[in-house]
Image (tube, rainbow, N blue to C red):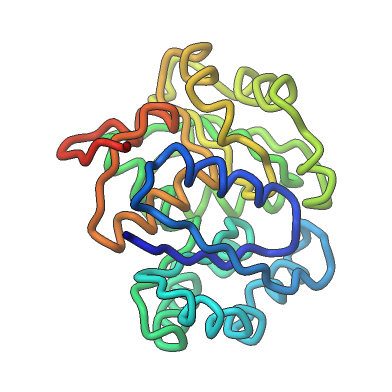
Amino acid sequence: MTALGFLYPGHSAEDDYPRMEQLLGSDVRLDVVHTDIGEDAHRVDALLEMGSPERLTAGVEQLRMSGAEAVVWACTSGSFVYGWEGAQGQVRALARSAGLPASSTSFAFVHAAQELGVRRVAVGATYPDDVAALFAAFLLAGGVEPVTVRASGIITAAEVGTWGYDEVLALARAVDGPDAEAVLLPDTALHTAAHIPDLEKELGKPVLTANQVTVWEALRLADRKVNAPDLGALFTREPIVQAD
């Protein structure tokens, strides 16, 4: 059994995790601990507070007790808002606190793009323009070039969590273009786990979504590869361990 831990801010699309756990097979467990979101706002000051060491540390002990082998801060905006170096410091502090390998969703996007061998991507963000621009800058710092970025201007994670497949597909289509090798949807408040194969079929290219890459990153930290085609192209890379 591989147990993986996730610190997830508030309550929006956390039901993606039991869905993904089911798709990964019987020997992977995804343990989610909810952190205090503070003010629900895609605003730089609120996001910096959401990702503060105090808020992350509060959930660490519960994950340690669960037997997690790795921990990921399951929040994109609450990590990239610190910038590349600041986000590295955030992860190092989390690893020290947990005594476990650690990462965040922002780094997961960069590592997932590297895994797929893609450099030029389209970004369909739910965030306001200024926050979406910070994610684009983070990707560039990691060697991934956003060729198009579309911001939806949504302020709260609660609103993002109400989106269904039609809204997600419309966002992905709006930002996609021939120069993009993959489409990135960077918000863990967005329900995507049930939609990835359909999105990839519609767009004809890999789609990387926040909760999907977060789980993949935790598996990477635990040195596990799982073949789960229902979670998209990212989960069909060799070498693989077939999901039950």
| Above or below, comparing residue 9 to residue 63 in the picture | above
Quadrant of res 150: top right
Quadrant of res 167: top right
What percent of the width, then of the height, locates residue 213? 45, 46
Q: Residue at x 44, y 33 (%)?
A: 231
Looking at the image, the residue that sits furthest to the left is: 239
The number of numbered badges drawn on the structure is 0
| Above or below, comparing residue 70 to residue 105 in the picture | below
Q: Residue at x 51, y 17 (%)?
A: 177
Looking at the rendering, in which quadrant would you find the C terminus?
top left
Q: Residue at x 56, y 41 (%)?
A: 19
What percent of the width, then of the height, locates residue 145? 41, 39
Toward the viewer: 106 or 138?
106
Toward the viewer: 71 or 123?
71
Looking at the rendering, in which quadrant would you find the N terminus?
bottom left
What percent of the width, then of the height, locates residue 148? 55, 30
Toward the viewer: 22 or 84?
22
Quick check: 200 left or right of 54? left
Q: Residue at x 38, y 25 (%)?
A: 181
| Above or below, comparing residue 90 to residue 241 in the picture | below
What percent of the width, then of the height, locates residue 225? 25, 46
